[in-house]
Amino acid sequence: MDYSKRVDMISAYSVPISYRPPETLPALDKCTDYPNTNSLQYRLTEAVPLAENQLPPFLDLATVNRAGNVILAGNNYTNRVWEGGLCGWEKAEELANEEKVIFSKRCEAIVTALCYTKDDALFVLGNDRGLIELWSTGNAVRGNGLYQVDRRYEHIGAITALDIFNGPERIVISGSMDGCIKLWDYSEGDLHTSRTLQHAHTGTITSVATDCRQDSLAVSCSYDRSAFLWDFREMKPAIALYEKHNAAFTTIRWCDEANWNRLVALGDEAGQVHFIDTRQPNVLLETVPCFDRKVHKISFHRKYFAVLGNTPEVKFFDDKSKQLHAEASASNYVRDIIWNDVKDSEQEASPISCTLIGWDSYLKRVSVDAVAAVTE
């Protein structure tokens, strides 16, 4: 090989000095000398911001406090900049009514986790940059209005799961793509880490859930095909709930004590829901096939539970795992569900209904009691 004739690749593929396309959109529109300028056109075009009190079209998350206030979070996956946003309403019946919005916020990153705390005016959100934020919707000193209490960058990967403990202490548990679980204490007016489990899982943590009856127990699941029971009173808190499953676990929920006998429900990428007793690990008590694609969320309410997947369909089941209804009115993924909230004294008389939220700004109210009566 004659190395004296080598081509200088840097100079051969560098932008020539004579290449000087217009630097403004009006000049670029009239220019015919540089036809292949799609990337330049994109860079010069400013992103169109969302209107006030409007959510991005991909509704992903919802949370409700004890007073019935609702927060919806949505993201934009098709714009030139992926971003999120959230809006709050006093009650679920007012969802999508822009005139009833009590607060709204634009986010610079994708909102990946959201939950109210034990205090009705405080909520926590996580994003795909590993940031966890504590927000307040008002207090006696500041009055009404959304303001940030604290924010922390301590997760390396995106925050994928959040939940709160129901004990006397004010603790939030978070999980992320880096397999790390953190406990956050917000009782002193800020967020600080009370415990860090750096390698809780070897894969992305897909979901965490706390026990509604005991303030020290939680469960988690991961893409590493395992699920763990955590007792944070112990120095070594992890107990294997289920290991080496044949598909990755995608969501986990702790069932209600009264109706479900302390069972844990696990959803996987194969579209199945499995029930496990925490007192009998590594044994699947029951498996309910739901979809031919992954389960996204499982939600329990009294004697019913709903299963959402990477599908427009939502399936409702009773406490015998009998399918009652399949809601297929959505045109895209259904991402979350809001159950109607009633007082204990009204539980027997009040009908059970829910609101489904999803992509393409999908909102749908479903009467679960009505569809159950038709099935029976």
Image (cartoon, rainbow, N blue to C red):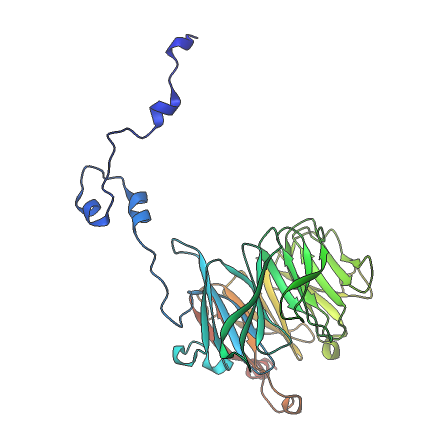
Q: Based on the displayed image, in which of its 4 quarters is residue 370 positioned?
A: bottom right
Q: Which of the pair 91/297 is nearer the observer?
A: 91
Q: Is residue 291 visible?
A: no
Q: Residue at x 44, y 78 (%)?
A: 101
In the image, residue 169 lies at what x, y percent? 72, 73
Q: Is residue 92 left or right of residue 186?
A: left
Q: Which of the pair 186/10 is nearer the observer?
A: 186
Q: Based on the displayed image, in which of its 4 quarters is residue 301 positioned?
A: bottom right
Q: Which of the pair 55/281 is nearer the observer?
A: 55
Q: Is residue 160 visible?
A: yes
Q: Is residue 52 left or right of residue 167?
A: left
In the image, residue 17 lies at what x, y percent? 27, 29
In the image, residue 284 lies at what x, y percent? 75, 62
Q: Is residue 154 above or below residue 85?
A: above
Q: Residue at x 60, y 65 (%)?
A: 297
> Quick one: quadrant of the N terminus?
top left
Q: Residue at x 72, y 63 (%)?
A: 219
> Quick one: quadrant of the C terminus?
bottom right
Q: Tag count in the figure?
A: 0
Q: Is residue 47 above or below residue 14?
A: below
Q: Which of the pair 340/54 is nearer the observer?
A: 54
Q: Based on the displayed image, in which of its 4 quarters is residue 173 positioned?
A: bottom right
Q: Is residue 160 left or right of residue 168?
A: left
In the image, residue 128 lies at what x, y percent? 54, 56
